[in-house]
Amino acid sequence: MIDQATRAALARPTALRRAAPALLGYAAVRALGLLTLAVWSAARGKSAYTLLTARWDSLWYARVAGGGYGYEVRLANGDVHSDLAFFPLLPWLERLPAAVGPLSYADAGFAVSLLASLAAAWGIFAVVEHVYDRRRPLSEGGAGADGGRAGLFAVLLWAALPVGIVQSMAYSESLFTALAAWSLYCVLTGRWVGAGALALAAGLTRPVGLAVVAAVWAAAVVSFVRERDLLGRDGGLLGRDGDLPGDDGVSCDRERGSFVRNGSAPGPHGARSTPHAPASAPRSPVRRVLGMLLAPLGAAGYVLWVGRRTGDGLFGYFHVQAGWRNGFDGGYAFARFVAAKFTSFPAALAGLGLIAGVGLIAGVGLLVWLYVVGVRQRQPLPLLVYSGVVTALALCASSYFGSKPRLLLPAFPLLLPLAAALARARVSRSALVTGALALVSALYGAFWLNGSGPP
């Protein structure tokens, strides 16, 4: 005979089955984008596949994959574009299928990007489902969104971003977002070693890996502080790391600093809490410390290696980035770019500069508003730290303005308030909104890649 608990466990859908609608929806949105790009490119006599795999950064990654580092281009104005500006994980992955099969490095980069984008969509779904599964209902002032529906719409919104076509290019954004999302999920569920290892890999993918490291460290430090407070308040009782249930059905909820027993009555935040329940046996904080130590090794290791290779020590990588006119200026270059839209001639006189300037300010305002809403909705600290750092690095960097939209692509936690709103809305309205966004994204992506495209 199968007891009731076992029967319930067998009936519970697996993680992949829960994520399947979101992954299918993601694939449909991206397929629409690729089909639109193919039709648009063919009408202009261009190859859509070449635009996706053999232009801009894709060429630099493929060159590193094929010949290693050491290539640079010296421009007439004195700038030096070195391939050391590109982090190594994507080229390493491009080498694997190219070494064992007939794929070129460009083909391998495209395949890695497609698989990584699906992994990113699944990671985003897992994070959002986990977050909103613990929300209070709307009647109690909470987000009021079902975790599965919120996760579905978060994935669809991420797929339908205006620059969503980058997710299908032989670029590193999809790979980085996948690593970041799953690292954040590991943090939220107390899997500290996994979080640190994924943060290490993210740090080998893009400079913004710093955001994942910051999220892991912030969550770990707060966890230590809350654990110490619980130790003093509850007479030495400590729960298990994260909020995964222990063998005795008791867990320590790190987000709320309270002990939780499965099956108890809902608490004020939608949690099932029993304040006086005995805690499970304490787990050593070694895993948490190990996760913290692993997290920065990827980015730090590559930066130090570049410094040694260039002979410039700790500042070697920053000198390489300076050759590309990249750096961190606190947003000064971006502010000048926006101001120029209001003062440049003859665009300003024609009103085009005014429209562009207002649009840029409105876009930044939207980002800030979404972040503030996330804070007010009490998103978990790791998500706030991660999205805050990604946004700050994108907006406050002195890089070419055309890069900023795709630099913001990994900041998926900013979409959570919108995803929750769509999850609460009627199905017909939510479907109409996401369908319209997918169509606009497909058209803009085709227009963008056939024009200036991502730098």
Image: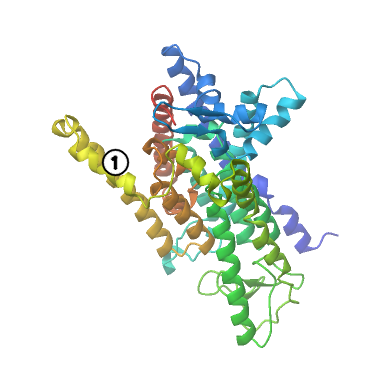
Q: Is residue 418 above or below residue 406?
A: below
Residue sticking out furthest to the left: 349
Point out the image quarter for the N terminus.
bottom right
**Residue 311, position as x, y percentages in the image:** 59, 44
Residue 392 visible, this angle: yes
Q: Nearer the viewer, residue 192 or 161?
A: 192
Q: Residue at x 42, y 63 (%)?
A: 375
Q: Nearer the viewer, residue 267 or 345?
A: 345
Q: Nearer the viewer, residue 118 or 140?
A: 118
Residue 143 lies in quadrant: bottom left
Binning the other alpha carbons within 10 Å of mark 1 as few (below 14), some (14 to 19) or many (20 upward) gives some
Q: Residue at x 39, y 32 (%)?
A: 440
Q: Residue at x 25, y 37 (%)?
A: 356
Residue 371 lies in quadrant: bottom left
Mark 1, secondary structure of its residue: helix
**Residue 264, position as x, y percentages in the image:** 63, 74
Q: Residue at x 58, y 69 (%)?
A: 221
Q: Is residue 430 above or below residue 229?
A: above
**Residue 324, position as x, y percentages in the image:** 45, 36
Q: Is residue 213 above or below residue 430?
A: below
Number of marks in picture:
1
Residue 254 visible, this angle: no
Residue sticking out furthest to the front: 311
Residue indicated by mark 1 = 337
Point out the image quarter for the C terminus.
top left
**Residue 145, position as x, y percentages in the image:** 48, 57
